[in-house]
Amino acid sequence: MRYGIVLFTSDRGITPADAALAAERAGFHTFYVPEHTHIPVVRAAAHPRTGDATLPDDRYLRTLDPWVALSTAAAVTDRIGLSTAVALPAEHHPITLAKTIASLDHLSGGRVSLGVGFGWNTDELAHHGVPAGRKRAVLREHLDAMRAIWTDEQACYAGEFVTFGKSWSWPKPIQKRIPVLLGCAGTEKSFAWLARNADGWITTPAETGLDTKTELLYRVWREHGRTGTPEVIALAGRHDANQLAQWAECGVTEAVFGLPDRSPGDVQGYLTRLAGKLGLDGS
């Protein structure tokens, strides 16, 4: 099982570049950042963890652009994977987002994966023109359109929400296929969407029963004709050796730990201690 790090980015504390470099030196496999373009002050959408309009962390108001953040990380690292947990492609035009992601994959030497979410903040989505009740369909079309741009010499797409004629767009990603990971609750409905449109699952922070839910994911994956096995990325809290062993046994491929909202020195110390507990070797 691999180990990754997620930094809840903000305009204070350690920078993404410094955090990614420290994570790479400590031996972690992947560096993740989240996305919110903005948080509407008046919202009908409840946060999944609080159950109401209250936010559990003021960094929701202060998140950095994920692709700018990952670009700074790419410039100072050589090996660590660069990803999002999670990005919200439904809030962006797929032509421009495809260019951004392909450019990052090109410049980083093929280290990008794309963690995506449907988006709990429906008010935020509405500000971007995503119709109520259609966020899954919009996300699917945006991913399909981006994949066309990434793979076809003359890309075109015709859908309900996205339409464009034959177009040239370079660079293409170094990878033949940018891995797409769906961040969602472990339900059969979401797993069916994942099996049709993505390559792996990122759990929610409070997800439980991963043994049963991973079995469900595998079953749905096979029922949709997918071969191999999907990636399973589990968001962890504190280091728990017993939990990690159970996750490895049930098919979790990567456990991801969040960084504390502290100074660069404190974060680097935390990474060193965590890497020691996990037995990582950054050399």
Image (tube, rainbow, N blue to C red):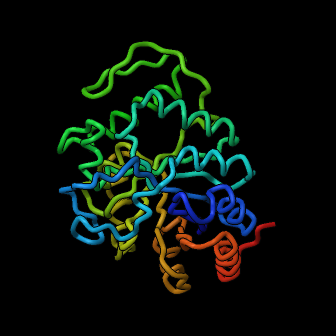
Position above or below: 257 against 34: below
Q: Estimate the x, y position of residue 103 in percent, counting from the top left.
A: 61, 33
Q: Is 14 on the left or on the right of 283, as rendered?
A: left
Q: Is residue 4 above or below residue 159?
A: below
Query: Which residue is at 39% across, 36% downward?
Result: 92
Give the answer, above or below, for where 138 lies relative to 188. Answer: above
Viewer-proximal residue, 132 or 114? 132
Left or right of residue 270: residue 54: left
Does residue 230 show up?
Answer: no
Picture mark count: 0
Identity of the residue furthest to the top in this view: 166
Residue at left offset 47%, top offset 55%: 63
| Nearest to the observer: residue 83 or residue 40 | 40
Quadrant containing the C terminus in the rendered view: bottom right
The residue lying at 21 percent from left, 41 percent from top is: 134
**Rendered view: 27 above or below 31:** below
Q: Nearer the viewer, residue 213 or 29?
A: 29
Question: Percent from the top left, x then y, of residue 94?
Answer: 42, 31
Q: Is residue 179 visible?
A: yes
Q: Residue furthest right?
A: 283
Q: Position of residue 66 (x, y in %)?
A: 52, 48
Which residue sits at x=54%, y=57%?
11
Residue 265, position in %: x, y? 70, 73
Residue 20 placement: quadrant:
bottom right
In the rendered image, which quarter contains the N terminus?
bottom right
